[in-house]
Amino acid sequence: MLGAAGGDGLPVRLSSRNYAGTRDGAVRDLGFDQPLAWVAVALLAWGLVMVYSASVALPDNPRFANYAQTHFLIRHTFSIAVGLIAALVAFQFPLRAWERMAPWLFALALLLLVLVLIPFIGKGVNGARRWISLGVMNFQPSELAKLAVLLYAADYMVRKMDVKERFFQAVAPMGVAVLVVGMLLLAEPDMGAFMVIVVIAMGILFLGGVNARMFFLIALLAVTAFAVMIMLSDWRRERIFAYLDPWSEEHALGKGYQLSHSLIAIGRGELFGVGLGGSVEKLHWLPEAHTDFLLAVIGEEFGLVGLLVLIALFLWLTRRIMHIGRQAIALDQVFAGLVAQGVGLWFGFQAFINIGVNLGALPTKGLTLPFMSYGGSAILLNMVALAIVLRVDYENRQLMRGART
């Protein structure tokens, strides 16, 4: 089984690492990756503290006048609790079950993306219709779409391994599926989620062994498509111009307002920060301080050191997940390996975009920081995706135990 990784039986991209030589200590004790789980717990706990810190003053705003100071803390805690239960349930399903469910989850995601656009079903906030109210929490179908496309793309590549070199048989059908999802997301509009889904799908195609020339052709088409969307949209163009010069008189109180105040917050933090709870920008200066711009509050309260620690945690998390995926592929579990690596791409890319936006390195885009920003459905799906990765690792360890007995 292990030897197949080097031959024609496993047409996927692998590193040169010899996973067959993994030490016994790596597969004993608990049957999942404990360091990975503890890093995720640390991010969730840090995020919970920061969501409370960033939202504690919101009731002073007339828009949130009826909210208690602990409103967002309680709701975020509830989301984490629901996410934990969902993650424990998700971990019980073997990867074979996820492979069978992949097309059905993709169909469910499409249905929800259609329903959210229907008045009286979808809930609009700030001009975007992205949520379905479930009473106890608002559910965002685009978050489910990320996981659904990931599973569907991994299942699709496993089924298309024999024709992966043929563009119209291997790539085009997946491209159509992503295009349909993209059209529904852009109708909300939610370009940020669409970008993440495109990166997930393209990454799985590449890791699944699609011809490099075809991959770069797809990448060129995707970049061109996003450029055209920006050029044809006045408000998206304004965001780009505001990103290039957020301090100008034209943009400082308009499209560049969030970015300029994010940079002020991070600048105030200097090396060690002003201390937990000491942020000034969260006091109604920085919009969405508890969601998309939570990192700016972290930078103000914990300084450069805090930001470097946070970036290091996400780098380690992404690398660890990718390692689990490569290990699964080396054990001839191609679907499981592609799913794990897709989750790594998802978390890594979304964290990269959020950090880049908060630091002013990328244009403003509404993407939350995984495991940390306020948002029920995002936390829920992040935890379910991580549980699937832990299940991949659990099955890897079971296979390696079996190989030695």
Image (cartoon, grey):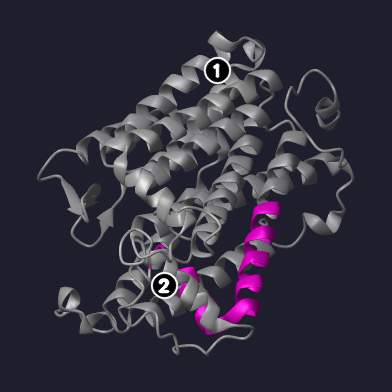
Marks 2 and 1 sit apart, C-alpha to C-alpha, by 43 Å
Q: Which of 31/39 is in front?
A: 39
Residue type, label 1? Val
Q: Quadrant of residue 61?
A: bottom left
Q: Which of 59/144 is in front?
A: 59
Q: Which of 348/3 is in front?
A: 348
Viewer-nearest of discs 2 and 1:
2
Q: Residue at x 47, y 76 (%)?
A: 264
Residue type, label 2? His
Q: Which residues are magenta?
A: 291-319
Q: Residue at x 38, y 61 (%)?
A: 256
Q: Which residue is mark 1?
A: 171
**Whole-percent x, y for residue 280 in the image:** 40, 85
**Whole-percent x, y for residue 369 in the image:** 48, 61
Determine the secondary structure under disc 2.
helix
- Examine the rendered structure and indicate whether residue 383 appears above or below residue 70: above
Q: Which residue is mark 2?
A: 261
For the image shown, how many numbered marks are present on the structure?
A: 2
